[in-house]
Image (cartoon, rainbow, N blue to C red):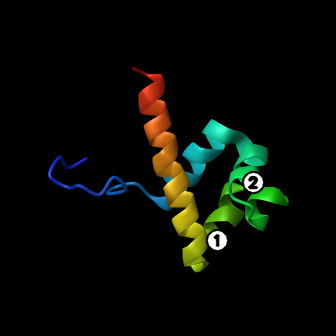
Amino acid sequence: MDKNNKDPLHGVTLKMIVEALYEYYGWEALGFQINIRCFNFEPSVKSSLTFLRKTPWARAKVEALYLTMIEMQKEENQ
């Protein structure tokens, strides 16, 4: 990651975000955190990516949860 770039999502793909959230929360908790169909009914990374790429408001929620998860992980590791 470029140290001069202040965007915490710089270089992080949507696929990386969805996979990290799934690994951290699991589908059930992820669907509870963000109540969207692709997380609650027959969830998969592929279906989630398809939906999130077409739906800016949902993608924004997923990216915000990802940033929150990163902060939580930093705190856990201190």
Q: Position of residue 70 (x, y in %)?
A: 45, 41
**Camera-side residue: 40 or 33?**
33
Q: Amino acid at mark 1?
A: Thr
Say left or right for 40 vs 15: right
Residue that label 1 marks: 50
Look at 64% across and 71% down and name the residue there.
Answer: 50
Q: Quadrant of residue 10?
A: bottom left
- Label 2 – label 1 distance at C-alpha: 16 Å
Can residue 69 be seen here? The reply is: yes
Local crowd size for mark 1, using a 10 Å CA cut-off: few (<14), some (14–19), many (≥20): few
Q: Position of residue 39 (x, y in %)?
A: 75, 58
Q: Amino acid at mark 2?
A: Gly
- Would you say the residues marked 2 and 1 are in contact, meaning their CB atoms lie under 8 Å apart? no
Q: Quadrant of residue 5?
A: bottom left
Residue that label 2 marks: 31
Q: Label 2's element?
A: helix
Q: Position of residue 60 (x, y in %)?
A: 52, 67
Where 78 falls versus 67 (above or below)? above
Where 6 falls versus 56 (above or below)? above
Which dot, 2 or 1, sits closer to the camera? 2
**Camera-side residue: 71 or 20?**
71
Where 2 falls versus 26 (above or below)? below
Say left or right for 26 vs 68: right
Local crowd size for mark 2, using a 10 Å CA cut-off: few (<14), some (14–19), many (≥20): some
Quarter in which the C terminus is drawn = top left
